Image: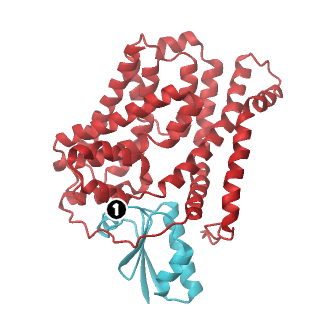
Amino acid sequence: MKTVKVYGPGCKRCQTTEAMVREAAARLGVAVEVEKVTDARSIAMAGVMSTPGVSVDGKLVHAGGLPDAGNLEGWLRA
Amino acid sequence: MTVETHDPAPHRGTPDWLWYVGVPAVGVVLYMLYGQLIPISEWVTALFPVARDSHTGEAIAFFVYDVPKVLLLLTGIVFVTGVLRSWFSPEKTRAILAGKREIWGYPLASLLGVLTPFCSCSSVPLFIGFVSAGIPLGVTFSFLIAGPMVGPVGLGLLYGLVGWQIATIYLVFGFTIATVAGFVLGRMGLERHLQDWVRELNAGPVGDLPEVRLTLVDRLKIGAEQVREIVGKVWIWVLVGIGIGATIHGYVPEAMMLRIMGGEAWWSVPAAVVVGVPMYTNAAGVIPIVEALLGKGAALGTTLAFMMSVIALSLPEMIILKQVLTLRLIAIFIAVVASGILATGFLFNFLL
C-alpha cells in the first residue's frame, strides 16, 4: 500500500493530478491511498512551492504543473 | 460528478518531427492571417446593415478587428512565454534569490517575477517558500508585484494594440515600481505584520526534487498546453474587454473623454487608481480598453495608472494573500504600490 499525497489549493490542475494518480494506480494494479492536501500551511511545510505537488510515501517527487503520465507510473511502481 | 478520464496530454502520440514542422507552420499561418486582419474585419463589418461611419458601425468595426487580433496575439505570446518559462521554476528562482545580497535582490526579484511560471493560486506556498528560505520580505514583494504587473501578456498586447513606445514606457515603469515598492516595503520592517503562524513557521526542508531533463519537444508541448489552458480561460475576459473598448470607441464623445481623463484634470489619476483596484480582469481584458481610451484622447498618465492598478492590484489576489499577511500589511502593501502607480501617472500627465 502506497500513500500518495497531492498538494494543491484545489485548482483544476490539482484535481486532474489526483485523477491521474488514481488512474495510473488502477492501471498498474498498485494499491494506493490518495490524500489531497489543500491547506496552505501544510503545502508549505511539505516544501512544495509550485502546485500541484505529488509525494509518494512521504517523498516529494513532483512540483508544478501536471505530472507526466510515464513518470507517474514510475513513481508508483518504485 | 464528472471525472476527467481522457488523457490530459492530447499530443502524446505526436512524433517529434511533427512538432518541429508543425509549430513553425502554424506560426506562419497565424502570422499571415494576422496581416490580413484589416481587410477581413472591414469585410465582416460591411455585412452589418449599418453605416460604416456611424457610432454603431465604428463600434462593430473595432470589435470584429480586435477580437481576432487579440486572440492571435495572445496565442503567440502565451506559447512563446510558456516555452521560455520552461527553463525557470519557483524552486530555481528561490535558489538564485536566497544567495544574493539584499540590494541586488530587488531588481533581480522583479526580473525573475516576470520569468518564473506561477499561478496566483499557488502564491501562498510560494510566499512561504521564499520567506522561509531567508529571502527578505521586501524582495519577495518585488517578485510578487512584478509577476502580474509586467507580465508578457500585458506587454505583448500593449505592443500590438497601442505601439512599442507605450509598451516600453510601461515595461520600464512597471519594473521600477516593482523594484522600488519592494525596497520601500523591505525598509519598513514589516515582518511583525505577518500572520502569526507564518512567523513561527520553521518550514520543512526544501523539497529536493530530482532534476527533470526536458527536451525541446517537451518545452514546445508545455507552450501548447499553456495556450490551451490560458486562452481557454481568458477568452471571455477578452470579449468583455473588447466589448467595453468598442463601446468607448464608437459612442463616447472625445470632448467628454478629455474632460474626464484628460491631462488637465489632476484628480483623474487618483480616480483612475480608485476605479482600477477593485476591477478584476486579466491583462488581456484591459488592454483593449486602454487602446480605446488612448484613441479617444485620454491622457497617457491617467491611462497608465488605470491599467497598472487593474493589473497589479487585484482583490482576489489580496484575499489569497490574507492567509499569510495581516490586513494591516495588505493595506501597507496596497498603499505603497498605489503610490508608485500614482507617481507614474502624475509624471506622464505632467511631462506630456
Tell whether B116 sits left or right of A24: left
Quarter of the image where the N terminus of chain B is located: bottom right
Residue A19 image position (x, y, % from top left): 54, 73
- Which hue is chain A drawn in? cyan
Q: Residue at x 70, y 63 (%)?
A: B18
Q: Nearer the viewer, residue B32 or B74?
A: B32
Residue B333 spot, x, y in % from top left: 28, 40
Residue drawn at x 58%, y 41% as measured from the top left: B237
Residue at 63%, 25% (x, y): give it. B247
Which residue is the site of mark 1?
A40
Q: How many marks?
A: 1
Instruction: Specify the color scheme.
Output: by chain
Left or right: where B103 falls relative to B107: left
Question: Which quadrant would residue B42 be assigned to in this image?
Answer: top right
Q: Which chain is red?
A: B
Decide which of A6, B135 is in the foreground and name it.
B135
Q: Give the structural element (helix, strand or loop) at label 1.
A: helix
The foreground one among B260 and B36 is B36
Amino acid type, callout 1 = Ala
**A74 left or right, relative to B21:** left
Residue B3 at x, y = what percent?
A: 60, 70
Identify whether A13 is placed above or below B163.
below
